[in-house]
Amino acid sequence: MQSVLPVIINAVPQTLLAVCRGVSMKIFVNPKIKRLFGGILLCVLLFTLIAVLLMEFEVRNAAAYTIACFLLMSAAILAILFGYFRRQYEVMENAVLQITEYISGNKDAAIECNDEGELYRLFHEVNSLAAILNAHVENEKRAKKFLKNTISDISHQLKTPLAALNIYIGLIQDEAEGLPTIQEFSRLSEQELDRIETLVQNLLKITKLDAGMIAPQKSLENVSEIAESVKKYFLFRADQEGKKICLSGSGETTFLCDRSWMMEAISNLVKNALDHTGRGGCIRIEWRGSASIVQITIKDNGSGICPEDLYHIFKRFYRSRYSKDAQGIGLGLPLAKAIVEAHNGTLEVDSILGRGTSFTMNFLV
C-alpha cells in the first residue's frame, strides 16, 4: 500500500496536466480566443515591464505611475473583453435569427459556421439537424402524395362495382315480385351493400384526415343551426323507432369550424346514440359557450358502455363483446374523434352501464 501511494500521488499532477492540455488545445483552436488571450497577456506584460522599469530607475512618484499604468491596463483588458463578447453576441444573435427563420418555415435558413472552435462545431451540428429534418419532411410529403393517389384510385375502383351491384339488386327485386324469399334476400343484400359503402366512405375520410389531405375550412358557424340540421337528418329514423331528439342551448353560440365536417362528427355521435337507445329513448344535443370554450354534448339514456370498453371505444373496428348492435362497423366514433382533433378540440366520454352515455366535444375559442 505504501509503495502504491507515491505512484498515485505522482500520477495525479500528470493526469491533470494532460487534461488541461487537452482542454486548452480545444479552446485555442478558435483564433478569436487566441487573440483574446494574446491581447490580455500583452497588456499584463507591458504593465509588468513598465512597473519593473519604474522600480529599476527609481523614478519619483513611481507608485502613482504604477497605479496609473494598472488602471490603463485594466481599461485596455476591459476594452478587449468588451470587443470579444460583442462579436460573440452578434454571432449568437445571427444564429438565433436563422433558427427563428427556420422555425417560421424558411427551410433554406442556415447558421454561418466558417470559423473553427466548439461554438462553430455546435452550429455545424444544428445545420446538419436542419438538413435531416428537411429530408424527413420531403419524404413525408412524398408519402402523403402517394397515399392521396392510392386513396383516389381505391375510391374510384370501388364506386363502380358498388353502384352496379345496387342496380342489379334493384332489378332482382323487380323481377322477384311475388317471391317473398328472394325479395327478403335481396333486401338483406342491399343492407349489406349499404354497410360496405358506409365502411368505404368512412375509411376514406379517416385516411384522408390522417394523411393531412383535408384541412378544415373554418368559418364562424352557429352551433344551433348545425344541431338543427343534424336533427332534421335523423328525424325520420327517430320517429320510426319511437325515439326523440331534443336540442338545448343558446341560439347565439358560435365558433370557428368546418360546417360539413362538424356535422359529420355530431352525426356519427347521434347515430351511435340511436343505435344504443331503445324505443321511447331520448337523445339530447346540448351546447354552451363561454369566453374561452365551446362545449357540445350528445347524451342518451340507452344501454351505456361497459367500463372495460371505455378505453377502447375510439379504436378503429373495435366491437364490444357485450354490444347488441349487429350493424355497427366500428368506425363512427374514431372518425368523430379524428374530426374533433383536426379542429384542435377534444372528445370525452362518460357512461353508466344501463343508464346512458354522454360524449362531450370541447373547442377552445
Image (cartoon, rainbow, N blue to C red):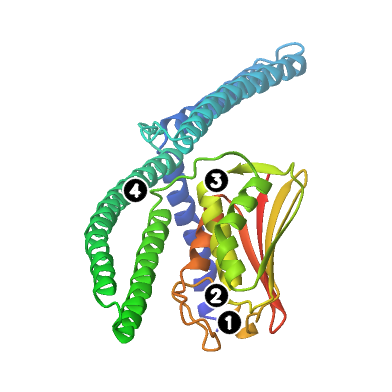
Please state which of residues 248 and 168 is positioned toward the viewer in this rendering: 168
The residue at the point 61 percent across, 67 percent down is 239
Q: Which numbered marker is on residue 217?
A: none
| Spatial CA span between label 2 and label 3 | 25 Å
Q: Which residue is mark 2?
A: 313
Q: Nearer the viewer, residue 53 or 196?
A: 196
Disc 1 element: helix
The residue beneath circle 1 is 309
Query: Where does the image place residue 259, in percent across and percent down from the top left?
Result: 55, 45
In the rendered structure, which amino acid carries the disc numbered 1?
Answer: Asp
Say which quarter of the image contains residue 110: top left
Q: CA distance from mark 4 to mark 2?
A: 37 Å
Which residue is tagged 4? 132
Q: N-terminal of the two: label 4 or label 1?
A: 4
Task: Determine whether label 2 and label 1 are within 8 Å by CB.
Answer: yes
Mark 1 residue crowding within 10 angstroms, few (<14) / some (14–19) / many (20+)? some
- Residue in the picture at 45% in, 29% down: 32
- The reply to whether the C-beta atoms of the residues labelled 4 and 2 are less than 8 Å apart is no
| Residue highlighted by disc 3 | 259
70 is higher (above) or lower (below) than 311: above
Rounded to the nearest angstrom, the CA distance separating label 1 from label 3 is 30 Å
Q: Report the side of 67 relative to 92 (left or right).
A: right
| Residue most extreme to the bottom | 321
Identify the mark nearer the N-term, 4 or 3.
Answer: 4
Q: Secondary structure at mark 3?
A: helix
**Quadrant occupied by the C terminus:** top right
